[in-house]
């Protein structure tokens, strides 16, 4: 069993790295064959996800006031959601979504399972375990966003503003790695980081893939335009 924060983080990322064929939407975007409606629906779903995740991160930060490193980690995650929301407006515009469409959209269960589970973790799980479960998933999410950003530029005519949402998540935020490492180290030092983190990570990854594959099922693959 890993005994240091770095070893524990590296082991979690390796174990929770999805297989190339687990995500059925991202390869379609990379090839330019995903319907534009799938990208538009992704943006619509993210309006609900970002708002929910921000609240979950803030609640986890509040529950972690006895551990400054863990609280700082979740506060930074919440701050990132504010930035993501500002970039999301540009993605929605690139997808030709107006305010009425965003307001009246009814989210899909398969896309909202991830934020629903994160909200459950925020209420019920030991925050130190949530850190480890999320860091591993953020690695996969960032890689997906990088591929999608490239595909949107190459095949869908999206500009830098239209891709800004994905670019934000694709590029490491300065200090994120150090904050995650410090949070995991605090969890280990306090004895609060347990094997439950592995189970949480498994479910987070499953719900992450459910999000993408729900979007992949919206319509048969076809020309981008």
Image (tube, helix red, strand yellow):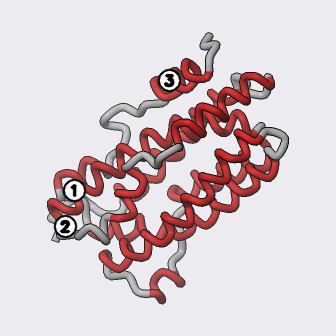
The extreme top residue here reads 1
**Residue 151 circle label:** 1
Local crowd size for mark 2, using a 10 Å CA cut-off: few (<14), some (14–19), many (≥20): many
Mark 1 to mark 3: distance in Å? 29 Å
Q: Quadrant of residue 203?
A: top right
Residue of label 3: 10
Asked whether the beta carbons under mark 2 and mark 1 sit within 8 Å of each other, the answer is yes
Q: Residue at x 37, y 75 (%)?
A: 90
Asked whether the beta carbons under mark 3 and mark 2 sit within 8 Å of each other, the answer is no
Residue 18: x and y in percent read 41, 33
Mark 3 to mark 2: distance in Å? 35 Å
Front in this rendered view, residue 172 or 84: 172
Residue 58: x and y in percent read 72, 57
Instruction: Name the element at disc 3.
Output: helix
Q: Quadrant of residue 163?
A: bottom left
Residue of label 2: 156
The N terminus - image quarter: top right
Local crowd size for mark 3, using a 10 Å CA cut-off: few (<14), some (14–19), many (≥20): some
Q: Residue at x 49, y 43 (%)?
A: 138
Is residue 199 shown left or right of residue 172? right
Front in this rendered view, residue 137 or 24: 137
Q: Residue at x 53, y 83 (%)?
A: 103
Instruction: Name the element at disc 2.
Output: loop
Residue 191: x and y in percent read 79, 22
Residue 202: x and y in percent read 57, 33
Is residue 52 shown left or right of residue 222? right
């Amino acid at each position: 069993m890993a005994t240091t924060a770095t070893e524990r983080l590296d082991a979690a990322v390796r174990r929770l790295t999805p297989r190339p064929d687990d995500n059925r939407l991202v390869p379609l975007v990379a090839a330019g064959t995903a319907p534009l409606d799938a990208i538009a629906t992704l943006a619509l779903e993210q309006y609900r996800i970002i708002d929910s995740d921000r609240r979950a991160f803030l609640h986890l930060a509040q529950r972690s006031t006895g551990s400054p490193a863990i609280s700082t980690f979740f506060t930074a995650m919440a701050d990132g959601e504010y930035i993501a929301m500002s970039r999301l407006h540009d993605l929605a515009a690139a997808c030709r979504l107006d305010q009425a469409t965003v307001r009246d959209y009814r989210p899909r269960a398969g896309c909202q399972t991830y934020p629903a589970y994160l909200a459950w973790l925020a209420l019920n799980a030991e925050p130190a375990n949530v850190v480890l479960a999320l860091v591993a998933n953020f690695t996969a999410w960032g890689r997906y966003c990088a591929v999608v950003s490239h595909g949107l530029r190459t095949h869908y005519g999206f500009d830098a503003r239209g891709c800004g949402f994905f670019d934000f998540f694709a590029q490491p935020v300065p200090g994120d790695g150090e904050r995650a490492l410090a949070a995991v180290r605090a969890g280990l030092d306090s004895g609060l980081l347990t094997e439950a983190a592995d189970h949480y990570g498994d479910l987070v990854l499953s719900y992450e893939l459910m999000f993408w594959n729900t979007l992949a099922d919206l319509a048969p693959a076809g020309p981008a335009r």
